[in-house]
Amino acid sequence: MYVHGKSDPAHNHGSVTHTSCDHGHSHQCLDVSGPSLPISNNFHVHDWDFYTSVDDGHRHHISGPDMPAPGV
């Protein structure tokens, strides 16, 4: 999936948000992506790997690449 190319370690993304409130609970998300990873056609992706806050006795683990975007 990834191609050999330059990755800019300063090019990352982050957010602070809450999930939707379903069944009486929501989760807080504090996340920062990994650096941009070049893929074909001059596009790039970012890897994510984070956990939500614990609510109602559970939390969620989110990981994997996001959708391709133009540029590197």
Image: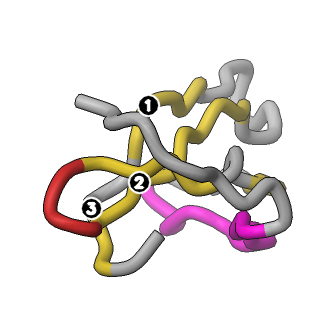
Residues packed near mark 3 inside 10 Å, few (<14), some (14 to 19) or many (20 plus): some
Q: Which residue is drawn at 72% across and 39% down?
A: 52
SS at mark 3 in the image: loop
How far apart in space, not on screen, are marks 2 and 3 (Cα)? 5 Å
Q: Nearer the viewer, residue 5 or 27?
A: 5
SS at mark 1 in the image: strand
SS at mark 2 in the image: strand
**Residue 31 locus on image (x, y percent):** 77, 53
Which mark is drawn over residue 64? Answer: 1
Look at discs 1 and 2 and give the one toward the viewer. Answer: 2
- State which region is magenta: 11-22
Q: Residue at x 27, y 61 (%)?
A: 68
To which quarter of the image does residue 18 belong?
Answer: bottom right
Which mark is drawn over residue 45? Answer: 2
Which mark is drawn over residue 32? Answer: none
**Residue 37 locus on image (x, y percent):** 50, 47
Residue type marked 2: Val
Q: State yes or no: discs 2 and 3 in contact (Cβ < 8 Å).
A: yes
Residue type marked 3: Pro
* Image position of 34 with respect to 11: above or below: above
In this orientation, does residue 71 appear? yes
Residues packed near mark 1 inside 10 Å, few (<14), some (14 to 19) or many (20 plus): few
* Image position of 41 with respect to 49: above or below: below
Which mark is drawn over residue 68? Answer: 3
Q: Assess whether residue 29 is covered by the magenta stretch.
A: no
How far apart in space, not on screen, are marks 1 and 2 (Cα)? 10 Å
